[in-house]
Image (cartoon, rainbow, N blue to C red):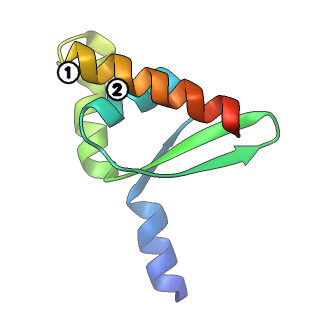
Amino acid sequence: MNLINEIKKDFNSYSTKDYYIASFLIAKGFKLASTNKKGREIFFVFEGREKIEKVLPGFYNGIEKVSALSLVTAIRNIKSMLHNI
């Protein structure tokens, strides 16, 4: 992959180490592109930075809705992923 495509990929990605945010994003339908381990911390990398930045304020102030079942499933999957890294 050339440098321009790598820069575009990085610019379009959103990274977080908070597994509740990661779970919320998965429950909202965002694609988990990868995980990166830096020391003891694990970062979840998602595609669609612009769209994610639009829904995150709703996560923080409690107005963005997700299915309870989708959220619980996402939390379980993220925790399982953390235990396997």
Visible in this render: residue 17? no
Q: From the viewer's perspective, is residue 66 above or below residue 15?
A: above
Q: Are there few (<14), some (14-19), or many (20+) residues within 10 Å of tag 1? A: some
Q: Are there few (<14), some (14-19), or many (20+) residues within 10 Å of tag 2? A: many
* Farthest bottom residue in view: 2
Pinpoint residue 57: horizontal percent, then vertical percent: 28, 24
Instruction: Determine the residue positioned at 31% across, 53% down.
Output: 48
Between the C-alphas of marks 1 and 2, the distance is 8 Å
Instruction: Determine the residue positioned at 44% across, 32% down.
Output: 22
Label 2 residue SS: helix
| Quadrant in the picture for residue 3 | bottom right
- Left or right relative to 75: residue 55: left
Instruction: Determine the residue positioned at 72% across, 34% down.
Output: 41
Q: From the viewer's perspective, is residue 8 above or below residue 29?
A: below
- Amino acid type, callout 1: Val
Q: Which residue is disc 1 drawn over? A: 66
Pinpoint residue 42: horizontal percent, then vertical percent: 67, 38
| Quadrant in the picture for residue 40 | top right
Pinpoint residue 58: horizontal percent, then vertical percent: 23, 21
Work out whether mark 1 precedes mark 2 in sequence or the reverse, and give the earlier one.
2
| Quadrant in the picture for residue 18 | top right
Count of marks placed on residues = 2
Q: Which residue is disc 2 drawn over? A: 24
Pinpoint residue 17: horizontal percent, then vertical percent: 58, 32
- Left or right relative to 33: residue 83: right
Rendered-image quadrant of the C terminus: top right
Nearer to us in this view, 26 or 47: 26
Label 1 residue SS: loop
- Left or right relative to 19: residue 40: right
Task: Determine contact: label 1, label 2, CB under 8 Å.
Answer: yes
Visible in this render: residue 22? yes
